[in-house]
Amino acid sequence: MTPTPQQTSVEAIEKAALEMIAARGFQDVTVEEIANAAGVSRRTFFRYFASKNDILFGNFAGLLKELDDWFASVPDDRPMFDAIAEGVMRFNRANTDGPVAHRQRMELILLTPALKANASLRNAEWLAVIARYAARRLDEPEDALGPQLIGHVSLGAANAAYERWLRDASADLNELVRRAFRMARTLAELDIATTRSSWRLDRESFKGS
Amino acid sequence: MTPTPQQTSVEAIEKAALEMIAARGFQDVTVEEIANAAGVSRRTFFRYFASKNDILFGNFAGLLKELDDWFASVPDDRPMFDAIAEGVMRFNRANTDGPVAHRQRMELILLTPALKANASLRNAEWLAVIARYAARRLDEPEDALGPQLIGHVSLGAANAAYERWLRDASADLNELVRRAFRMARTLAELDIATTRSSWRLDRESFKGS
DNA sequence: GCCGAGCTGGCACTGAGTGTCATTTCGCAC
DNA sequence: GTGCGAAATGACACTCAGTGCCAGCTCGGC
């Protein structure tokens, strides 16, 4: 049993906030209004959330820890991007209070500049988890170009899938994630297949070390 | 000739701001202080910059337009990622007031949460330019998964190169950009080369459509 | 020299976020 | 069930970003 929850529950504030924000937009709802709706003082709101921008991000740190632990348990003989793709899907699932609220929350985040900007800070923490796993797999330092690149690319693939999902009400997020990671793994093929004629290799920026 | 610049130059404000921010940190400098140092009222500051977060981003929109125009002039027989890598390097070069200030500015942006968050909004605009080019090359809609993915991955490669550059005072940014894009193109090879033993393909998330 | 347009400064106001302190609530020991 | 200490809360004051409004100034054209 939980040792008796605090009188003021984080969930109550989140619920009140999501309802008002969904109805009127993030910018038009003040923290004071949210606090009142949740039966809490403005000051107490800021004891539970570092900023107004954090209301919709829930227990991000906790989910991140879970993800990190999961990657630690992935065997090294599993293809890296296969594991990362599954990590993304696990993270999304854990991040959900039912698919409807999930979509609504993601829509708000990606369509509200202040929230999108805040999300980038969270994404940087997420990226660090991926980079740590990639560093282990590549046997390189975490801050080397390789692991960091894999982190950035994975974040890009996940974001591309998310944005596409929000445009298609009918699309399946997991399927989009799989497609995005499959494409990301083999971008060179995409490049070659769509380059109409030969480009003189001695002009290629990619040549050389 | 320019038709007589405004009395208040954007450059003067930027210069005053950069000096104070570099010396004392972004958060500890108030808009009022910057405005005073630039000999301008606080109100006027906000007529030149939409927010305090925008001071260090210069004429981003103008550079973006240049980049877009340049991509429009790239022939379709040039390999896509080769062109994008050059686009990144061109953008960086145009974004510079001498390499010292460039590095200092990027350090501030990437190390100050508020600025990093703001940068993500700018990066989204940058990404849209890349996606437009990719859409043309792939002959797909701009908002399809492919073009968007290429935009996200390119942004990731550029960011990975940037962050690595900031850690290595001696590193060459262009070389890092080339390396990052070369790796991004062939991630599958990296994956295969570092997967220690065979993973049963029927468990692969990538299988199927 | 006059006039209108655009730039500027000053002022007041909203709202986010923070420090401080008094009060309340709750778990716990007795 | 009574009292105690710690933690949570509420209230207040304050800083600072950002905005609307209006009055005054400057500059070029007439």
Image (cartoon, coloured by chain):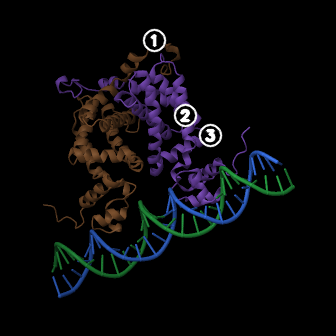
Chain colours: A purple, B brown, C blue, D green
Give coordinates of residue A51: x percent, y percent.
52, 52
Q: Which mark is residue A156?
A: none
Look at mark 3 in the image and give the residue it sits on: A97
Q: Which residue is at 40% across, 20% downward?
A: B191
**Amino acid at the residue labelled 1:** Ser
**Amino acid at the residue labelled 3:** Asp
> Badge 3, how many Cα within 10 Å: few under 14, some, many 20+?
few
Which callout, 3 or 1, points to the residue nearer the camera?
A: 1
Q: Give the quarter of the figure containing the N terminus of chain B.
A: bottom left
Which callout, 2 or 3, points to the residue nearer the camera?
A: 2
- The CA span between labels 2 and 3 is 19 Å
**Amino acid at the residue labelled 2:** Lys
Q: Which mark is residue B197?
A: 1
Mark 3 chain: A
Instruction: Describe residue D16's horizontal placement relative to residue A29 as left or right.
Output: left
Residue closest to the eye, B122 or B209: B122
The lab-note entry on whether marks 3 and 1 share a chain reads no
